[in-house]
Image: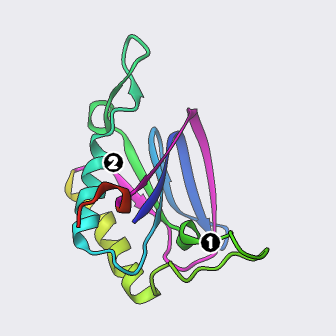
Amino acid sequence: MRTVIQRVKHAKVNVNETTVGKIDTGFLILLGITHNDTEKEVKWLANKIRDLRIFEDENQKMNLALGDINGEVLIISQFTLYGNCIKGRRPGFIDAARPELAENLYLKFIEEFKSFGIKTESGEFGADMKVELLNDGPVTLIIDTDEANIK
């Protein structure tokens, strides 16, 4: 799994000009899933993101996690995170998981955050989505479970 995490003041996602997910302060999480991902990656990644201390404390130090600030998450499926742009001018998506695997793990990832008691909103899997956000900082991080050796 590969994620782009953005610390936001607010974010929302629209499908067909209708808002389907909206949060205040927290994380916008773009989630990409590849062929060999399992529920093990879902659990590891959700816990890692939940516990990231990237919100500022009273001394303006990145020292607080989502739970410390009562933060929220907006999770968007993003197969293009596995786009390969090395050859040619059009990206290849051979490393992105097939929709039947990806949708199942995406839904499990959402449920994992809900189980933490964190307000969790999401986009619509496979839809053409329009995402709006106010990045705070800006703070943007990338986490790839392949680099964590959790297999």
Q: Is residue 122 magenta?
A: yes
Q: Is residue 65 above or below residue 14?
A: above
Residue 10, percent from left and from top: 53, 42
Image quadrant holding the C terminus, namely bottom left
- Tag of residue 32: none
Residue kind at label 2, given as amino acid type: Ile
CB-based contact (under 8 Å), mark 1 and mark 2: no
**Left or right of 57, for residue 90:** right
| Residue 113 visible in the displayed image | no
Provide the residue span drawn in magenta.
117-145
Relative to 63, say whether 83 is above or below.
Answer: below
At 40% from the left and 18% from the top, the residue drawn is 61
Q: Nearer the viewer, residue 136 or 149?
A: 149
Decide: few, some or many residues near mark 2? Use Cα within 10 Å; few <14, some 14-19, many ≥20.
some
Instruction: Please tell me which residue lies in front, 30 or 115.
Output: 30
- Residue 31 lies, in percent from the top left, at 46, 63
Residue 9: tell me if it is visible: yes
Q: Secondary structure at mark 2?
A: helix
Is 148 displayed left or right of 15 in the figure? left
Residue 12 quadrant: bottom right
Query: In the image, what residue type sits under mark 1?
Result: Asn
Picture layout, residue 78 above or below residue 136: below
Instruction: Say which residue appears at 33% left-offset and 48% top-offset.
Output: 49
Q: Residue drawn at (55%, 66%), measured in percent from left and top? A: 81
- Of pointers 1 and 2, the one earlier in the residue sequence: 2
Disc 1 marks which residue? Answer: 84
User: As drawn, which residue projects farthest toward the right?
Assistant: 89
Mark 1 or 2: in front is 1
Give the residue furthest to the front: 87
Q: Position of residue 109 (x, y in %)?
A: 31, 65
Residue 49's label in the rendered image is 2
